[in-house]
Amino acid sequence: MPEISWELFHHQVAACALCPLHQGVRNKVPGQGDVGAPLMLIGEGPGQVEDEEGLAFVGPAGQLLTRMLAAISLPRDRVYICNIVKCRPPNNRVPTEEEAAACRIHLRMQTALIRPQVIVLLGSTAAKNILGPEIRITRDRGRWFERKGVLFLPTYHPSALLRDPARKREAWEDMQRLRDKLTELNLYPDIYGGTP
Ligand code: URA
């Protein structure tokens, strides 16, 4: 791999024309947060507000995500948040496999720069893209998956929780699992305390 850096990453996303999505955007949404975080969260793709602001998860789904993290005492600025695709798909449709595949070089580079130990996959698109097409979010959410030493937790996308609040109980269970794992691995000792 060539020398990678955040400068190169942001330049490559800004210049990217690997799929047609770049044609319709107001802003690309590379992702943001603590670049040294042990925890990364990956969503699907920018929505309208994200496209307007150039930031991931700042619209209604993002506000719910902020509250979900706060419920386990995690300030948003202590995690890194991004999406499978960095450009808003028209009318918020699900990104195609080709679009997700084209964008993978960007996700790979940012994951290599952050080197998170735990990754939360928000929704079916993120879970299938990262863990494989056989993943079913309703069946596999809340289970830990391990790939190359990194732990992955698929859970519902916050937009799905806004549409169907009955799923919030399961999402809350997933957040508790996340908190327990971060505690066990001692990844946020200032928040959860050290392991005994
Ligand atoms: N939904 C996503 O998947 N990502 C965002 O950034 C916002 C909404």
Image (cartoon, rainbow, N blue to C red):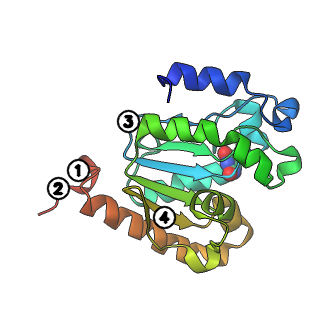
- Determine the CA span between mark 4 and mark 2: 22 Å
| Quadrant of res 113 | top left
Q: Looking at numbered disc 1 in the image, what kind of residue is underneath it?
A: Pro
Q: Which residue position holds label 4?
A: 153
**Which label number is shown at residue 1?**
none
4 and 2 marks in contact (CB < 8 Å):
no
Q: Is residue 155 above or below residue 66?
A: below
**For the residues carrying marks 3 and 2, which lies nearer the camera in this image?**
3
Q: Is residue 111 above or below residue 183?
A: above
| Furthest residue toward front | 1
3 and 2 marks in contact (CB < 8 Å):
no
Instruction: Name the residue at 56% across, 21% down.
Output: 8
Q: Looking at numbered disc 4 in the image, what kind of residue is underneath it?
A: Leu
CB of mark 3 near ligand 1 (< 8 Å): no
Q: Looking at numbered disc 2 in the image, what kind of residue is underneath it?
A: Gly
- Determine the CA span between mark 1 and mark 4: 20 Å
2 and 1 marks in contact (CB < 8 Å):
yes
Q: Which residue position holds label 2?
A: 194
**Which label number is shown at residue 189?**
1
Instruction: Name the residue at 56% across, 67% down.
Output: 155
**Which label number is shown at residue 36?**
3
Q: Looking at numbered disc 3 in the image, what kind of residue is underneath it?
A: Gly
Q: For mark 2, give the secondary structure.
A: loop
Q: For mark 1, give the secondary structure.
A: helix
Q: Residues within 10 Å of mark 1 (few under 14, many from 20)?
A: few
Any part of residue 130 in sight: yes
Name the quarter where the C terminus is drawn: bottom left
Using the image as rendered, state which of residue 172 and residue 92 is in the foreground. Answer: 92
**For the residues carrying marks 4 and 2, which lies nearer the camera in this image?**
4
Q: Residues within 10 Å of mark 4 (few under 14, many from 20)?
A: many
Q: Name the spot of residue 147 as percent of width and height, x first.
A: 44, 59
